[in-house]
Amino acid sequence: MSLTSHPDRLLPADPGTRAVARRLHHAVRDLPIISPHGHVDPRLLLDDAPFTDPVSLFVQPDHYVTRLLHAGGVPLNDLGIGAGPLPQAHARQVWRLLCGRWDLFRGTPVRYWLETALSDVFGISDRPGTGNADDLYDRIATRLAQDSHRPRAMLDRFGIEFLATTDDPADDLTAHAALAEAGLRARIVPTFRPDRYLETAAPGWADTVKRLGAVADTDIGQYHGFLAALENRRRHFIAHGAVSTDHSHADAAAEPLPLAEAARIYARALSGEVLKAEATAFRRHMILEMARMSCEDGLVMTLHPAIARNHHPPTFDRFGPDTGHDIPTQVEFTRALRPLLTRFGTHPGFHLVLFTTDPTVYSREIAPLASFYPSVYAGVPWWFLDNPSEIRAFQRSVTEIAGFSRLSGFIDDTRAFLSIPARHDMARRLDAGHLAELVVAHRLDEDEALDTLTSLVSAQPRKVFKL
């Protein structure tokens, strides 16, 4: 049995609409990939070491894969989560588990990404299963040993022109500095992710902030020093090519505090005496400060709140974060962001990209905000919403309210390197299908549809992220 990587996959079923979509997709399918938000480790590209085995590519870094296997009854420790490079015998056993439970991925975008990578990168047309797991493992491992399948070679092969990573403000960014001198075709840049510095009630927060102060060579004993340290590190990131900041907290609220109150809460946090309500108020105040800093230094601000992180404490205790059990919660933007947008919503050059894992929020709040404020862009569906059904719903609801010019362009948001081109291909196909429907409904001419699709792939992310 073969993989279902049909050349018309995801395109509309109606023959006339599909013909238009096919032409549109063909025109953009080979355009360079711009990835303004993701989690690939820059050291992967700096070291350019051969991948050790198929599991280190397809399973260990991809919590989309591991959470579905776990839900199907496969223990995470059997998948080598948190174990680093696996002995070959263990890696082969993990691969057998993946192939043996291929049925768990039916109908999911995960299957699409996996099949696209297997087909396009490794030339595999056989559907994985128990009977061919070892053969597929050996065929992939043979390719991985070749120079053509080392990280930098695949970076070029995938056509990645711009790739943003996600980085701690205290990171010295030496890997990025070295990559900038490595002569790569792709531009690899860091992204400023200050979440843990804004959550004053988190365990070890005071020590975390002291490290920030040391790296910034700034006295963080008082609130104004804390702000100065963050501003210092933002400048450091900009000097290394950063174009954006990334924020994810329990809600989207941004509420100002009087200066004296912010300083008081900060002092209590340093002494380990901050109350939960004070910590929440301080974090909401700091979101406003982050926006203020973006207006001053030009970094694009991306916001993706309302994720209940580490939902299963025993899994977190054993395997740590980012292991598949972060779960979406409801979120509100309109009232929550009003103080921020009152101050900065019409500030020249300020860009705020809003994401959600609450699908009803797109048409109810994000699209209307983006249709008024010149600073606001609707971030595409991501994480639990990065599937064909939700993307199609997003296309219909958001663009009819705000228009295509208010979209962020596609965001792959992945640490699974091989899934980047597969995710972008899926987005291009779905956008081509949506635009083809507008053409056959006589709402757009085909040249307008092509211009729009080309913009979504290339011009729009360049504009939104100031590339």
Image (spheres, rainbow, N blue to C red):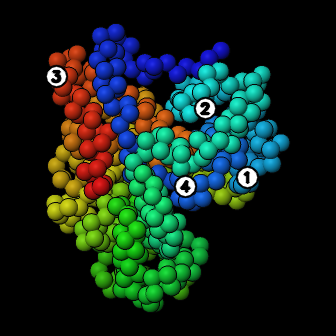
Residue 251: image quadrant is bottom left
Mark 1 and mark 4 lie on one chain; the one further toward the N terminus is: 4
Residue where numbered disc 1 is placed: 85
Residue where numbered disc 4 is placed: 45
* Residue at the image position 54 percent from the left and 81 percent from the top: 211
Residue where numbered disc 2 is placed: 122
In-front residue for pair 178/391: 178
* Residue at the image position 18 percent from the left and 53 percent from the top: 373
Mark sitting on residue 445: 3
Mark 4 and mark 3 lie on one chain; the one further toward the N terminus is: 4
- The mark closer to the camera, 4 or 3, is 4
Instruction: Calculate the distance from the C-alpha at mark 3 to the C-alpha at mark 1.
Output: 52 Å
Measuring from the top left, give residue 290's x and y in whole percent: 33, 69
Q: Amino acid at mark 3?
A: Asp
Mark sitting on residue 50: none
Mark 2 and mark 1 lie on one chain; the one further toward the N terminus is: 1
